Amino acid sequence: EGELSSINLDEKALEDVIELPIWLKIKKATCGRVFIKIPWTSLKTLPIQIQLDDVTIEIETCEQLRDIHNLSNANDPSMGKYGFTNRVID
């Protein structure tokens, strides 16, 4: 078990996961508290528990559109971006 507080989140990673429209971008993302419980001895039978409290995301419009080609490859396993975190979210 572990707990973290006052965490700054990766804006680019969130944009890929959330699939924002290309005219929006995340300016800032924070999480007040994260609690995680990992059952190391039973990983295949028990779930990993993650609790997020007070997630704040500031979004702004872009002056120039974000690159749509990078967005289309965000969840492509051959691009190396789809990993354990994506499977947990799915």
Image (cartoon, rainbow, N blue to C red):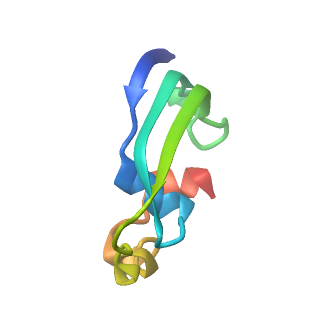
| Point 40% across, 64% down: residue | 62
Image quarter where the C terminus lies is bottom right
Residue 40 placement, left or right of 9 = right
Quadrant in the picture for residue 4: top left
Q: Can residue 84 be seen in this view?
A: no
Residue 10 placement, left or right of 29 = left
Residue 49 placement, left or right of 32 = right
| Name of the residue lying farthest toward the front | 63
| Point 37% across, 66% down: residue | 81
The x and y percentages for residue 82 are 43, 65
The x and y percentages for residue 68 are 40, 81
| Point 45% across, 81% down: residue | 72
| Name of the residue lying farthest toward the bottom | 69
Q: Is residue 10 above or below residue 7?
A: below
| Point 39% across, 54% down: residue | 13
The x and y percentages for residue 48 are 59, 35
Q: Can residue 44 be seen in this view?
A: yes
Q: In this view, does 57 lie above or below 64?
A: above
- How many numbered discs? 0
| Name of the residue lying farthest toward the right | 46
Q: In this view, does 24 lie above or below 71?
A: above
The x and y percentages for residue 77 are 42, 75
Q: Which of 34 and 14 is in front in this view?
A: 14
